[in-house]
Image (cartoon, rainbow, N blue to C red):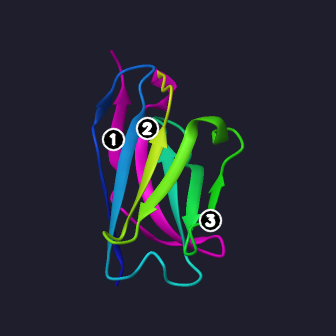
């Protein structure tokens, strides 16, 4: 059973870069044909897919966030990471990492609250 765990700062100042890491256990992030996504949920709003890194290292981003988002991985640690630059209070949300197979998100982390505030 694959498990995902998000980690990173819970508070980020406006204009700074938000950085989160997802540690995966029980399965490899290089296993065909999974993709590993970042998804967020702002308070009172729905889920928003931000982007993903596939088993082969290919990356995919939401068009609305592409200019500010970078997803990378460390296969030696079985981790993948999110960086979101130039954050504003509108980026305040619960951030989730999830495993994706052909659009179905079968495994999720528990989520981590990130607040953007000075």
Which mark is first along the chain, 3 or 2? 3
Q: Position of residue 10 (x, y in %)?
A: 28, 36
Report the magenta residues as a range.
89-118
Can you give x and y, in whole percent of width and height, for residue 91 in the image? Answer: 48, 31
SS of the residue under disc 3: loop
Inter-mark Cα distance, 2 to 3? 25 Å
The residue located at (49%, 44%) in the rendering is 41
**Residue closest to the eye, 56 or 82:** 56
Quadrant where the image shows the C terminus: top left
Crowd tier of the residue under label 3, counting other residues whose Cα lies within 10 Å: few below 14, some 14–19, many 20 or above: few
Which residue matches tag 3?
A: 58
- Quick one: quadrant of the N terminus? bottom left
- What is the C-alpha distance between the residues marked 2 and 1? 6 Å
From the image, tell me which residue sits under label 2: 93
- Taking the magenta stretch, the answer to whether it contains residue 116 is yes
Q: Do the residues labelled 2 and 1 touch (CB within 8 Å)?
A: yes
**Which residue in the protein does label 1 denote?**
113
């Amino acid at each position: 059973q694959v498990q995902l765990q998000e980690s990173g700062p819970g508070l980020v100042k406006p204009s700074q870069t938000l950085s989160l890491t997802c540690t995966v256990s029980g399965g490899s992030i290089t296993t065909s044909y999974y993709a590993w996504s970042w998804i967020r949920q702002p308070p009172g709003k729905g889920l928003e897919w931000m982007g993903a890194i596939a088993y082969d290292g290919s990356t995919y981003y939401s068009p609305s966030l592409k200019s500010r988002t970078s997803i990378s991985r460390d296969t030696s640690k079985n981790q993948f990471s999110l960086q979101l630059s130039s954050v504003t209070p509108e980026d305040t949300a619960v951030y989730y990492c999830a495993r994706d197979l052909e659009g179905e998100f079968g495994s999720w982390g528990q989520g981590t609250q990130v607040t953007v505030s000075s």
